[in-house]
Image (cartoon, helix red, strand yellow):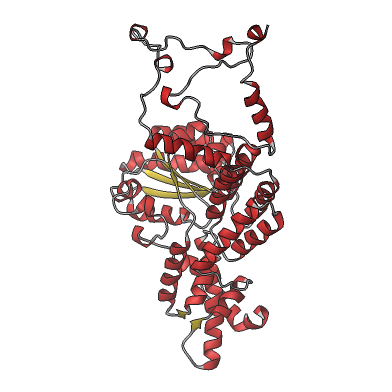
Amino acid sequence: MAEDLFGAAAQDRLAQRAPLADRLRPRRLDDIVGQDHLIGAGQPLRVLIEADKLSSVILWGPPGTGKTTLARVIAGHTAKAFETLSAVTAGVKDVREVVARADQRLGERGQGTILFLDEVHRFNKSQQDALLPSVESGLLTLIGATTENPYFEVNPPLLSRSTLFRLNALDGDAARALIAKALEAEGIGADAEAVAHLAARANGDGRHTLTSLEVAMALASQRAEGDGVAATVTLIDAEAALGTKAMRYGRDDHYDVISAFIKSIRGSDPDAGLYWLATMLEAGEDARFIVRRLIILASEDIGQADPTSLLIAVAAAQAVEHVGLPEAQLNLAQAVIHLATAPKSNRTTIAIGKAQVDVREKPSSGVPAHLRDGHYQGAAKIGHGIGYEYPHNDPRGWVEQDYRPPELVGQRYYEPTSHGHEREIAERMASRSKPKPDEAS
């Protein structure tokens, strides 16, 4: 159906014009969507740009979040010369030529130079080192853009001389705002369902959103010309542009599906967990929301029965940030399978709940004297630290000693189950009630 809709007329219409993402590229800070934490009113980066006081910066964020756009807006705000290089094609020779021009500019007319280096992580160590003296001296103000973690990909000396600003993936609201701007600029209407579908499939990437919208608008315009009516992007256009069918996924679905997802994993059904994961991904659910729930579940429903589950969930969260969708769906699926098949225990949840009740409801006499800090001069005179037994001095590696206020001694919060690793914990805790070796004799 998509091939039929996307006919020769739509292709010609797209070919005759610059890409929509380029035509709509913001020229003012206020036109940039989704990065209010950086360029909202009174935010540090905005203040520096508007005052033309920007020092070297690294812009880090996923594709399509506006790194290049922000650099071009900066170019429009600065009295400095603005040079651009792409680390994909540039080398040390290109850097030296930029440095030479910057030196000449500064000497002849006192004008500084900003160098925008796209894909800065593509420069190797020696190429990055070639920039360092000019950045350090202030001859060049560097704006580096990267999709990779700069702590891994940018040389520490260069990173230490730059301020790091992280751009966020566009959320649903930002994607809808971007779509609305494009529709207004192009003078084309759109059904609410079409906008919702395009926004849901944005995956945080503004450029991808506009590219998909451009195809949908071309389809709508082609159809409108044939019918003699005003162009309106429909859900069918959006589905054809994206190559995916829209799913009915409203506010109630959001809560119901995540509930089924968590209950399936808690119930140790990996297939059900994967089904609900696939449902959420196909509906465009925020992957960060999904993985946050997995991290919570790893402690709430598994805990010490399998301590590696928390590590797996956190690793999946890192994968979502560094890899992104669609590839990160593999990491999410691996985490779901691990958590669903892991032994279960809610004793961590119960334990912290019991402890919080005691803290809130039972008056405490405070930290016992033998547990108080005894390292400072005069502490011993007031009894702090006196009587504390150092566990490592005991051959068992622990000593029987009160670690709570007297009124709470003997109160049990954590009671391990016999599931998974908690069986070993329970046995170890039980063994600590036995007498010392010398007492047994």
Q: Residue at x 35, y 60 (%)?
A: 28
| Left or right for 53, reference 144 | left
Q: Is residue 438 in sight in this rendering?
A: yes
Foreground: 249 or 353?
353
Q: Quadrant of residue 113?
A: top left
Identify the image quadrant of the N terminus: bottom right
| Left or right for 259, reference 105 | right
Q: From the top left corner, tell me how far across and down residue 64 is, in percent.
A: 51, 58
Please tell me whether residue 439 is drawn above or below residue 153 in the rendered image. Answer: above
Foreground: 66 or 308?
308
Q: From the top left corner, tell me how far across and down residue 12 is, in percent.
A: 58, 79
Q: Residue at x 59, y 83 (%)?
A: 9
Q: Quadrant of residue 29?
A: bottom left
Q: Is residue 18 in sight in this rendering?
A: no
Q: Residue at x 40, y 45 (%)?
A: 114
Q: From the top left corner, tell me how far across and down residue 58 is, in percent.
A: 46, 43
Identify the image quadrant of the C terminus: top right
Please tell me whether residue 162 is drawn above or below residue 386 in the rendered image. Answer: below
Please tell me whether residue 365 is drawn above or below residue 306 in the rendered image. Answer: above
Q: Residue furthest bottom?
A: 228
Foreground: 120 or 256?
256
